[in-house]
Image (spheres, coloured by chain):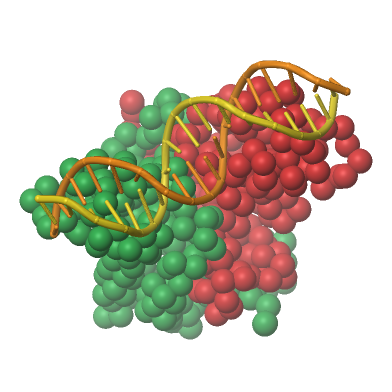
Chain colours: A red, B green, C orange, D yellow
Amino acid sequence: MSDDLEAPGRILDAAEALFAKQGFTATTIKQIGSAAGLNPALIYYYFGDKEKLYHELLHRTFGLFAATAAERVSADVPPADAIRALIAWQSEAMLEHPTLPKLLVREVLDWEAEHAREEITQLAAGAFARLCGLIEEGQKAGIFRRDLDARFAAISSISLLPYFHVFRPAAGILLGRGTEGPTREQAEAYGRHAAAYVISALEAKRGGAPPGDASSSDRDAVPKD
Amino acid sequence: MSDDLEAPGRILDAAEALFAKQGFTATTIKQIGSAAGLNPALIYYYFGDKEKLYHELLHRTFGLFAATAAERVSADVPPADAIRALIAWQSEAMLEHPTLPKLLVREVLDWEAEHAREEITQLAAGAFARLCGLIEEGQKAGIFRRDLDARFAAISSISLLPYFHVFRPAAGILLGRGTEGPTREQAEAYGRHAAAYVISALEAKRGGAPPGDASSSDRDAVPKD
DNA sequence: GTCTATAGGTGGATAGAC
DNA sequence: GTCTATCCACCTATAGAC
């Protein structure tokens, strides 16, 4: 990351890399200071304490992500194209910014998303709501199958890439490489695959499914609260 | 978990809950001893040190999981039914055993799957290989679309449930509940949804896709090493 | 096998000089 | 704003009594 920055920015950059790699508890203030090339005491001067630093980091990272995601879900193109573009963007974003999925998963595991509540709510109201809208639009137009709950389908569709990027070491083993994980080429290919997979899941089968075929399409819905 | 067990079993049970909830570093030997109702020093007596305890825990948990998974991918039924059953089993397993996806994700993030290498390799050779075989079988039979890479499709198909269960707090926000996450009913409904979603993704569109329609089906493949 | 006591080390955080 | 010194709490691990 950028080296010629003011202290707070350098601290945030160093913290981002370390928190993503090691997690909150395993990362020490001294490590962050050393990675930032700064005296660890400065962290207290600028951020108060370790948890406030962590919180501000998430605010910066996820806030930017939620905003960009919302912009990226365009409503001016057919639903299938918009969704394909969204997945492609996810793939790019995670290749360029590998700490993002890791920070997100760690935050959810360690704090039940408490520090990211605001940004996830923002995401829910923005990009996620629009994605649900796109799916419903496609369902009404008859190009998407109607037996999938739109919100569940939206969750499934945005799951694939974060999971793959978090699981890279395990995916590496499954794909017959070491724990090094898939190559960058494989990760890019997976991004293209995911877009095709998601669209295939959503698309209505041409000719339509036989009405009473309960075995091949489980009707599901989000139970009301 | 069971209370009338010998010391090592009780320690493993307590460690499983705590490592899943808090992670390796944030969990202390004293917490484990206290949760097990035993003197913390016994952990050293039975397991040597904290990391060995952790390693043995993963060995127990993932070993059992990999073995059961392999059994569960039956080859005697049509591919679509076998895959539906696999997803349904994943859903059940994670509802009954919520620590499993958390331990897996934490292990991958914290140690790059180092402590679970053996079991993941076992999974790759067993359940995962069979799942790939099922997908290829369906592709040859013409019921699954051929433009998806079988290994990528297998990864995508088994991704949905672990992701959902790890992300429960965030999914709760997206589904309009608090950080408490989805209800059990919603989680069960998601399991049914995931099976339908996966089958829909894999199934060939009736009537077949137009040959030159590159926009709607990105041809993808795992690049060779 | 189980428990107490404690050594040895490290981490978060602050006081205060410059 | 930056750095040094340091306090205190707590954690892993062991020694050794019972």
Where A225 sits versus B200, above or below? Answer: above
Residue B160 is left or right of residue B44, and the answer is right
Q: Position of residue B224 (x, y in %)?
A: 67, 82
Q: Position of residue B85 (x, y in %)?
A: 30, 64
Number of numbered discs present? 0
Where B166 sits versus A164, above or below? Answer: above
Viewer can see residue A156:
yes
Viewer can see residue A80:
no
Q: Position of residue C7 (x, y in %)?
A: 42, 48
Which image quarter is the C terminus of chain B in?
A: bottom right
- Tell me which corner region of the image, top left, top right, bottom left or bottom right, holds residue A47: top right
- Tell me which corner region of the image, top left, top right, bottom left or bottom right, holds residue D10: top left
Q: Position of residue B65 (x, y in %)?
A: 31, 66
Name the residue located 47 percent from the left edge and 80 percent from the top edge.
B136
In the foreground, A185 or B112: B112
- Tell me which corner region of the image, top left, top right, bottom left or bottom right, holds residue B134: bottom left
Residue A110 is left or right of residue A54, and the answer is left
Name the residue located 86 percent from the left edge and 45 percent from the top edge.
A2
Name the residue located 30 percent from the left edge and 80 percent from the top edge.
B75
Residue B128 is left or right of residue B86, and the answer is right
Where B210 sits versus A60, above or below? Answer: below
Where B206 sits versus B78, above or below? Answer: above
Name the residue located 26 percent from the left edge and 80 percent from the top edge.
B76
